[in-house]
């Protein structure tokens, strides 16, 4: 049984990936909880900003801001940290720290904070978890630690990690987070240089693929729509192709973090999928 997802050939376009076929029978309890990490605004027109091919006509959609808690035995991974509490109009109504408090978790109990990418709506509350090891794509980390971070790179909340006060693991490709194939960070560049998505393998619910911003809504996913502001168009399409193959092979449920239509794919907080 292959337990670790391994990249055998460099490059997302040409790489060959080996995925675990079965979880160990002794795998610990695993659960997945959705957290509200921002307040939705009114529906917005998605064409042409979210399609460089002008694919969506007059379509308007309401975006949501989601974070996710993975429980793996007595260890926890927090995936993305949403908007900062000070962000005008879209700040969360309840902070991540307070949400976790509602299920009797303290920030120091979070072992890992996994970040899909460096944009502010995914990184705003990361500094609430200084004891956690930061798991972040190497391309994202390089951008955050640049002497002059580019526009859109939300580096400020990462100061503790940048200064070396907190633990960080830049992830160049894929990462088997807990070492048993149950939770996989998948290298899906294109939206940003080191973007990652997350595959969670739940014993009862089944496999769940959390998109990050590989796509922003169903129509993006269905017709390979590439936002005009993405870092690399070819990488985006290659990452989409890879994810769709993984989803098919694992019969996974796709959860698009910004699509309100995907909220009900997981139980409402504080319940979790198992």
Image (cartoon, rainbow, N blue to C red):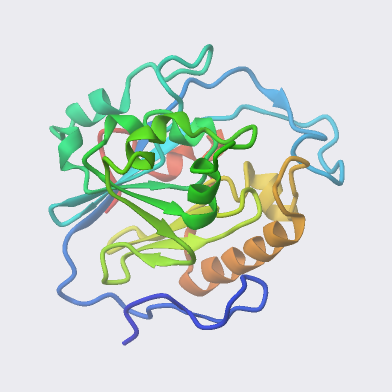
Between 24 and 162, the one lying in front of the other is 162
Whether residue 102 sits left or right of residue 171 in the image: it is: left
Total number of numbered discs in the rendering: 0
Residue 102: horizontal and vertical position, in percent? Answer: 19, 27
Between 121 and 50, the one lying in front of the other is 121
Residue 113: horizontal and vertical position, in percent? Answer: 32, 45
Whether residue 132 sits left or right of residue 153 in the image: it is: left
Whether residue 131 sits left or right of residue 219 in the image: it is: left
Quadrant in the rendering for residue 206: bottom left
Q: Residue at x 49, y 66 (%)?
A: 173
Report if residue 255 is visible in the image: no
Quadrant in the rendering for residue 264: top left
Between 197 and 60, the one lying in front of the other is 197
Q: Residue at x 70, y 48 (%)?
A: 231
Between 19 and 132, the one lying in front of the other is 132
Q: Residue at x 38, y 78 (%)?
A: 20
205 up-or-down from 272: above or below: below
Residue 38: horizontal and vertical position, in percent? Answer: 46, 24
């Amino acid at each position: 049984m292959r337990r670790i997802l391994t990249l055998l050939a460099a490059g997302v376009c040409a790489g060959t990936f080996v995925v675990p076929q079965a979880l160990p029978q002794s795998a610990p309890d695993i659960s997945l909880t959705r957290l509200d990490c921002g307040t939705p605004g009114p529906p917005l027109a998605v064409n042409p900003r979210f399609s460089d091919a002008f694919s969506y006509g007059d379509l308007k959609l309401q975006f949501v801001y989601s974070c996710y808690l993975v429980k793996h035995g007595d260890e926890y991974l927090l995936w993305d940290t949403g908007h900062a509490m000070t962000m005008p109009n879209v700040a969360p109504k309840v902070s991540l720290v307070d949400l976790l408090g509602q299920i009797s978790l303290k920030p120091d109990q979070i072992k890992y904070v996994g970040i899909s990418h460096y944009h502010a709506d995914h990184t705003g509350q990361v500094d609430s978890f200084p004891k956690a090891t930061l798991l972040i794509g190497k391309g994202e980390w390089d951008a955050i630690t640049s002497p002059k971070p580019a526009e859109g790179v939300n580096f400020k909340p990462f100061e503790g990690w940048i200064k070396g006060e907190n633990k960080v693991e830049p992830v160049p490709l894929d990462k088997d987070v807990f070492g048993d194939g149950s939770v996989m960070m998948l290298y899906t560049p294109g939206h940003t240089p080191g973007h990652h998505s997350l595959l969670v393998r739940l014993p009862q619910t089944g496999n769940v693929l959390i998109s990050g911003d590989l796509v922003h809504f169903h129509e993006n996913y269905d017709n390979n729509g590439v936002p005009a502001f993405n870092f690399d168009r070819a990488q985006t399409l290659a990452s989409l192709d890879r994810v769709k193959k993984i989803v098919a092979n694992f019969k996974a449920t796709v959860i698009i973090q910004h699509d309100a239509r995907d909220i009900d794919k997981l139980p409402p907080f504080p319940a979790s999928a198992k």
